[in-house]
Amino acid sequence: MSGFQINLNPLKEPLGFIKVHEWIASIFAFATCGGFKGQIEIQVSCPPTITENKTITATFGYPFRLNEASFQPPPGVNICDVNWKSYVLIGDYSSSAQFYVTFAVFVFLYCIAALLLYVGYTSLYLDSRKLPMIDFVVTLVATFLWLVSTSAWAKALTDIKIATGHNIVQELSPCKKKEILCYFGSVTSMGSLNVSVIEFHCVAQAGMQWHDLGTLQPPPPGFK
């Protein structure tokens, strides 16, 4: 068995180059999704008792169990004699979010192992018949599950945007009363979540295509 010897040439080839991008994308995916915190604000008033708009907020984040995110009025303020803490956002998207983050962590760990093999045991990888095939099969399965998890999370993200959008005012029963006026205030931007979905999806597709080329075809002379 060949000993550990650093050889950076594989990183210049599609097989190693795409693995690095997959590794970076996986970090970005579980960091942005797993660390996301957002807040929705709604302005409430009930003239003539309260003429000024008071703000109630609901904080949400990973794993996006919105049905556990209750609205909070300002401390010590009674807004329209309503117990706002008993009202929550709608929906539970934890399964899609957790699947997405968990698989991103798996891809992160697998890319580290694969890069260690490419860079540290290049000769062993090239001389073996089983290692490239095992690597190919694992990448094939991982890419398929990667695309599935990304698609599921993309759908869940769309639903989260709807659940935290302007329509939430219509879903709150106190806001349906004539004496209570509710206006949608704002919601935290989810731009980072959009980018993570797009990048994760694109890198997965590219990784499958380039891994196919890099594994099944003889490596170029400069690979060793």
Image (cartoon, rainbow, N blue to C red):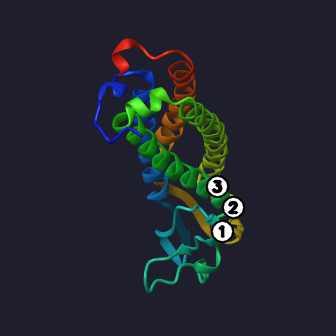
**On the image, numbered disc 1 is attached to which residue?**
67
Q: Could you say where residue 131 lies in the image, as x and y percent from the top left?
A: 54, 35
SS label for mark 3: helix
- Farthest residue to the top: give it: 221
Q: Amino acid at mark 1?
A: Asn
Mark 2: give few (<14), some (14-19) or many (20+) Cα within 10 Å: some
Residue sitting nearer the eye, 89 or 155: 155
Q: Could you say where residue 177 lies in the image, as x and y percent from the top left?
A: 70, 70
Side of 86 where 121 appears, left or right: left
Tag in front: 2 or 3:
2
Q: Are marks 2 and 3 in contact (CB under 8 Å)?
A: yes
**On the image, numbered disc 3 is attached to which residue?**
163
Residue shown at 57% from the left, 27% from the top:
208
Q: Is residue 70 above or below residue 105?
A: below
Q: Are marks 2 and 1 in contact (CB under 8 Å)?
A: yes
Mark 3: give few (<14), some (14-19) or many (20+) Cα within 10 Å: some
Q: Amino acid at mark 3?
A: Ala
Residue sitting nearer the eye, 199 or 74: 199
SS label for mark 2: loop
Residue sitting nearer the eye, 40 or 101: 101
Q: Is residue 189 above or below residue 207?
A: below
